[in-house]
Image: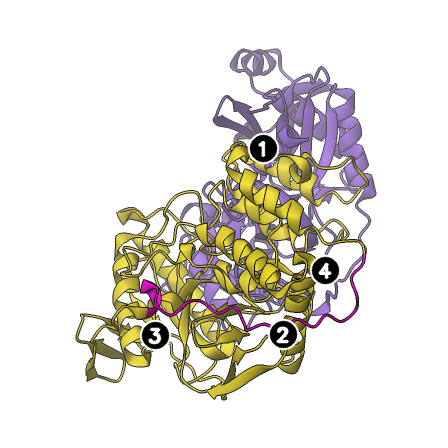
Amino acid sequence: MRTNDTALGLDVGTSRIVKAERSGEEYKYSSELNAFVTIPYSKITAGVLEREGIPHSVENGEIVVQGNESEKFADLMNAEIRRTMTSGVLDAKEPESLTQIGRLIESLVGKGKGAKLCFTVPAAPLGHEKNLTYHEATLKQVLGDLGFQAKAINEGQAVVYGELESTNFTGIGISCGGGLCNVCVSYLSVPVMSFSVPKAGDYIDHSAASITGERANRIRIEKEQSFHFNGHYADKVHQVINVYYDDMIRTLVTGLREAFANSRNLPKMNRPVPVVLSGGTALPKGFRDRFETILREQTFPVQISEIRMAANPLHSTAKGALIAALSD
Amino acid sequence: MRLSGLITGDRKPLVEWRASHISDPVERLRYLRAATDHAPRPKRRLLVRLPRNWRAYTPLILLGLVFVPGPSTSGSVTVDRPLPLPQRDAHPWTAAVPNVWLVEKAALYETYSNGLRIETQYTAGHRPRKPFPGYSGNLDRPAVRWLSEPRGIVFHTTESLIVPFEPGRTREMLRLGRGLLDYVKSIHAYHFLIDRFGRVFRVVPESDVANHAGPSVWADPENAYVGLNESFLGVAVETQTGEEQTASSGQIHSLRILTEMLRAKYKIPMGNCVTHAQVSVNPGFMKIAYHTDWANRFPYLEVGLTDNYALAPASVAVFGFEYDQVFLQVMSGEPWKGLLRAREQVRQQAAAAGVSVVRYKSALEQRYRKLAAALAIPAATGEKAHANE
């Protein structure tokens, strides 16, 4: 068996950045929130951050806290966290996006010394020719500057590589993230169709926030910590989250159906194919069942053998990117 | 969208099979990426590499050298010899037919005297079976008998997604089984499906045709059959053909009692109960085993049959098809005993006819093509909409 354990996989998502690496037969993961917050500079605070190993930098007389701890500091300082990405790509309206994502990535992966690294990029939204070149090229440059031989991989395809080994990487990989839902149809490891749907976790948060009057961040915390699809909702927030989840899943399923209908060059799958769901937005209990119910409401152009959750929905994309890097 | 590198046709089963035997995901992906890479590259080792136990193939290889077609043969060959059907006195054709009868028929199931229970909730009618031809007599002027009852059974594997057979995976297995049943029902893929737990489901009534065999041939002492969708019943086991026996004991038990019932009901001889790999052909290239399900390890003896891998495949003995390197790879060093016998039969028949083996095989091939054309069987197999066609 040929292995190259120095390679890395990096899932660069709107919400989180996840690193995967392999040590022998074991996969290891670490992640950082893809966000940052600016707090006033003080020597004591800077010292504490340094001691605790919290990713931060001092810029223009302020401390910029990056990653997981940014949320806590935002709460403490009653400030909003800022994100480097929106809708799956670098946020053009955030002046610090490039600098901060560079720091976040460096804090996760360190220096490359020529190691291989595959990082995820989204697919173009269905029906749109969104230009993803800038996003991909920028990340490649950031990683290249850190000393990596970096290569982009479609996010949905990474899910397939991470989860569908048992079907020889044939099937449909879906990653439901913060900014986008990414879909890839793969046939014997070859991506034959990929697209994204711009309704995902952030869409649910913001839409539900506008209805309930809550802050989007509170909606997100409710969604991640206590929401589940059981048909009985204790409060209005859960009820509204359910409505927008349904809308997201329906959009995703409709997108899949349309993509199959409009694609002329798909190979004929000679047996039913599996669908695997991953990503933080797919985490609530009952998500798989709801997805299956909506998918099976109408006939689907391809026979589905099973719909299942990824073994580890938060890490499967990074794992797939790692497998791609190792196999290069 | 990158489609140029997709594997289709003859290579696909081999590539999939090989990939599924690579346990490390990284190595498996590396292999598949190389296999689907369409860029020009040096010749694959796969095509020229001999199997590890290549010495076991020596007789086949030597016979292969004898059978290599010459650079040119005349367009039409006439060899007036009897169709080389199997001899009547062998055990697979003379063994007694079991005695099994219907005990109870309810709305959603049937039970039989040997303990067989057939679930019928997934049964959906398809096209009623039309009279089909059985060929006998001479090679160039075969006699045709029109038959209506099923003459045999073709055993399939579903090659669908299989999870480990463990108590903790029961729900998953049930869910996969339901999905599979919905699918095979929608395409009328088999007459019967045996799920992971050995439950027998009728998918297509025996009076109707199922799309299970694709281009296929077989022969018994009375007739040769071309296109077995019409003439044979399809029985599928939810499993995959692999290096080890993957059918569960429950599935093998169900195979046994279902086979008994079908043999009793339609007076099917043991020799006409064969696997899809044994009957499937690729007419485009005149190769055997286009489909490779149950190419080996079908538990013939446990199912209460003779070892029918020892029977000479009609594709080779009667219609002049050949095996290829892909077939040898799939067989993992255990080619059917009947294959050598079939090739020897062809050699003897050619000698008896006083023509070269090449000329005799050309006659067999022409006979197949005429019969297939009459039955409108496609000359080339490729990607088809349905799993087995």
- Residue B53, position in %: x, y? 51, 33
Going by the numbered disc 2, the residue's amino acid type is Asp
User: Which residues are the magenta region?
Assistant: B72-93
Which chain is assigned yellow? B
Give the x, y percent position of residue B315: 55, 63
Residue B151: quarter of image? bottom left
For discs 4 and 2, the disc positioned in front in the rendered view: 2
Badge nearest the viewer, 2 or 3: 2
Question: In 3D space, how far apart are the residues under numbered discs 2 and 1 (Cα atoms)?
Answer: 54 Å
| Amino acid type, residue under disc 3 in the picture | Ile
Whether discs 2 and 3 lie on one chain: the answer is yes
B373 relative to A246 in the view: left or right: right
Q: Which mark is residue A126?
A: 4
Can I make out residue A294 in this image? yes
Residue A233 can be seen in this image: no
- Mark 3 falls within which chain? B
Tell me which numbered mark, 1 or 3, is placed earlier along the sequence.
1
In this rendering, which labeled residue sits more in front, label 2 or label 1? Answer: 2
- In this rendered view, identify the residue nearer to me: A277 or B75: B75
How far apart in space, not on screen, are marks 3 and 4 (Cα)?
55 Å
Res. B204 image quadrant? bottom left
**Is residue B260 shown left or right of residue A69?**
left
The disc numbered 4 marks a residue on which chain?
A: A
What amino acid is at disc 4? Leu
Q: Mark 1 sits on what residue?
A: B27
Q: Which residue is mark 3?
A: B268
Give the CA distance from mark 2 to mark 3.
30 Å
Measure how far apart labels 1 and 3 are at the Cα level.
Answer: 46 Å
> In the rendering, which numbered label is found on residue B80?
2
Q: Looking at the image, which is closer to me, B97 or A92?
A: B97
